[in-house]
Image: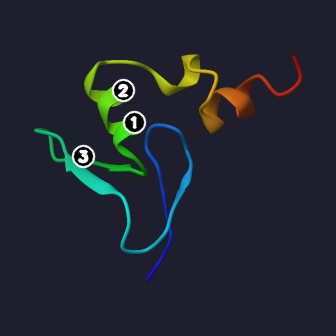
Amino acid sequence: MEWKTCSFCEGTIEPGCGKKYVKKDGSVMHFCSSKCEKNFKLGRVGRKLKWTNTFKRINRGQ
């Protein structure tokens, strides 16, 4: 088993946890929590939310 990375917040997902979402075009999204899944479905971008690892990684030096 391998650890996955959340497609929204870039958090780690343990084997057997999280959800997999397949879009109509066939691309696969992995979510670590329902919070990430709901924010993705609402059309929000993880880069703009302060609690995501993506935001923290991009704005590290500021």
Q: Position of residue 3 (x, y in %)?
A: 50, 70
Image quadrant holding the N terminus, namely: bottom left
Kind of residue sitting beneath label 3: Ser
Mark 3 is surrounded, within 10 Å at the Cα level, by few (under 14), some (14 to 19) or many (20 or more) other residues, namely few
Residue furthest to the left: 24
Which one is earlier in the sequence, the residue at label 2 or at label 3? 3
Residue name at image x 56 percent, y 23 percent: 47
CB atoms at circles 2 and 1 under 8 Å apart? yes
Mark 2 is surrounded, within 10 Å at the Cα level, by few (under 14), some (14 to 19) or many (20 or more) other residues, namely some
Judging by the rendered image, the residue that carries numbered circle 2 is 39
Q: Position of residue 49 (x, y in %)?
A: 56, 20
What label sits on residue 35 in the rendered view? 1
Q: Which mark is nearer the camera, 2 or 3?
A: 2
Task: Say whether residue 51 is left or right of residue 31.
Answer: right
Mark 1 is surrounded, within 10 Å at the Cα level, by few (under 14), some (14 to 19) or many (20 or more) other residues, namely few
Q: CA distance from mark 2 to mark 1?
A: 6 Å
Residue name at image x 30 percent, y 31 percent: 38
Callout 2 secondary element: helix
Kind of residue sitting beneath label 1: Lys
Residue name at image x 52 percent, y 38 percent: 9
Up the image or down, 15 lies above or below 11; here it is below
